[in-house]
Structure formats: structure tokens, C-alpha cells
Amino acid sequence: MSNFQLSELTAGNRRALAKAITLVESTRDEHRARAQDILEQVLPHSGNSIRVGITGVPGVGKSTFIEAFGLHLIAQGKRVAVLAVDPSSPIAGGSILGDKTRMEELSRREEAFIRPSPAAGALGGVAQKTRETMLLCEAAGYDVILVETVGVGQSEYQVAGMVDFFMVLMLPGGGDELQGIKKGIMELADALVINKADGASEGIATQTARQYTSAMNLLRHTTHWTPRVMTCSALEGVNIDAVWGMLVDYYLQASAADAFHAKRARQNRDWMHQLINELLLMKLSGSAAVKAMMPRLEEAVAAGEMTAYGAARQIMDQL
């Protein structure tokens, strides 16, 4: 991508952005090199958005919520990018982006950019592609980046490690469902938002919010922010403005406590260490000497003739 095309990207040209993301997602070595060159160039233009992670149980209405929330943000004069992280299967159902038609109105808007999750398997997997795509979206002038996780388990932790604010969408009807939420996810959440608080479910949603608030109070939170519990109806557009108000509050509180940029700096450092580990592993697994040694060492360890540490040391000596 020439500087001319870079200026197209920073001018908010969606086609230039899509091309740059395609390059970032490519697994070919020459594309990776060009992609890294582009990322170096866009770095000074990035970092000016608020990054929001959104997860939730199946059937919670994530795509309806993201569409309603995205349209509300556009009405506030914001430009919105929606990205998905699905480390389990980019083909299987579940992803809002496997089917853009579920966010039909948002996908038609000039101020919105919706991008499906790429296939995993390359260095850093989907998480790296999403991190790099976020930088490109920021350089293209998107103010709010919504990162939707559609996998289960590990993907929530990956997304929480790359966003400023992590939101968990819930269904009305606490009790049993509360047992079903992993404690770890509760500790990651900056907010629990109970969707579908409309019609007959409105009263149940209010009751559920009280139960979740009590549960959240039992968890120790060491940051400047006290996680909030609120209700909304994405279908009827109720309280969507309050969700955005909460995010603005978070941003102001985090900035006042010098926590906003500190969190991003910490995430970048952690990510660097993770990539060092993955690059070392790639270098080792690509080594002919290691490939030749591996079957013999595996047999020796399996037979109890050598310790796992001893075998690992021999592999590491190949570096």
C-alpha cells in the first residue's frame, strides 16, 4: 500500500480499509511483511477510539443489541466498526457476521463498517487479526469499535485483553442462569446488561438486575470502576442511550484516574510477550533438527526413560 493509499485509508475510505484488513488477515509471508509495514505507518493515526467487547449467552439478542447500539451511536455523530472474534469456528452459525442480514440496517449505513471473523490458524490466530484490524479501523476514523465474541471460554478472555470496556449481555431470569455464568467472566465484566427487558419480561429483568447486582458486589474489584448492572430492550430501543452514557462515564473516570492509557499500555506489553512465545514456538517447530529429534524424545518421555523437562531442554538447545 503506497502512501497515497494510506492517505485514502486515513481519509476513511472503506475500500482502502477493507483491502488493508485483507492484507493483515493473509497468511502469506510477503503479505504479512507488507501488512506490518502498513501497521507501522498507521500507528500514529490509531488509538483514538473507545474499544468495547460484547459477549453473551446464545439467544440473548447480541446482533439486535449491536445494531440498535450502533445506530444510536451513529445518531450521536459517531462512526462505528463491528468486528467478530470466533476462535472455535468461523463457518458455524452463531456469528452475527456469518449473516450480515441480521444487522441489515446497520450494514447499509455509510458510518458503519462490519467485518467477519477470519479463519484461525495463523500466528496469533483470530485474536491477532482482530487487534491489528482495530488499529486500521481507528486510523480510518472509527470512533467506537465493537468487538463481538461468539466463541465460548477462551475467546472472552482474549477479547477482554484487547478492549477498554467489556460488556456481558444477559437474559431476564436470574437464579439458575447466574450459576451458569463462569465466575471468571463475571470478574472480567465492566457491566452486565440485561437485554429483552420488555413486555412480560420487564419485571423479571428488574428482579434479575437486583440479583446480579448482589452477586457483583461479592466480587472484589480493584480498579477505579465499579461494574454496573442495567436493563435494556434492544428490540424497542429502550435504555440504549443509558448504555452509551455508562460507557462515557467509564471513559471519563478512567481518564481522570490515568487508567485508560495505562490499561492499553499493559495490554500491548502482554500481547508482545504472547507473540514472542508464539514466534519462538514457530521457529522451533519449523527447525529440521527439532523435527528429527521429536519422535525419539517423545518415545523416551512416554516410556519414562527421560523427564519431560530434560526433553524440552534438548529441544530448546536447538535455538
Image (cartoon, rainbow, N blue to C red):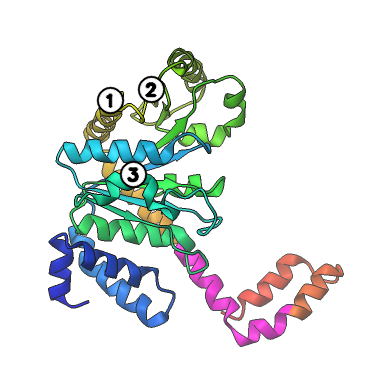
Task: Give the mark, 1 or 2, whose residue is nearer the N terminus.
Answer: 2
Q: How packed is label 2: few (under 14 Cα within 10 Å), some, or many (20 or more)?
A: many
* Membership of 282 in magenta stretch: yes
Does residue 207 sit above or below 49 in this rendering? above
Q: What residue is disc 1 on?
A: 242
Q: Secondary structure at mark 2?
A: strand
Residue receiving disc 3: 263
Depth order, front residue of 182/102 = 102
**Can residue 156 be seen?**
yes
Query: Along the horizontal axis of the image, is 291 left or right of 94?
Result: right
**Quadrant position of the C terminus in the picture:** bottom right
Q: Circle 1: is it few (<14), some (14-19), or many (20+) Cα within 10 Å?
A: few
For the N terminus, the image quarter is bottom left
Q: Position of residue 162 (x, y in %)?
A: 38, 49
> Which region of the structure is painted magenta?
274-294
Q: Which residue is mark 2?
A: 230
Mark positioned earlier in the residue sequence (2 or 3): 2
Image quadrant where residue 298 sits: bottom right
> Badges 1 and 2: C-beta atoms under 8 Å apart?
yes
Residue type, mark 2 in image:
Met
Separation (CA) of disc 1 from disc 2: 9 Å
Give the image location of residue 247, x and y in percent: 28, 33
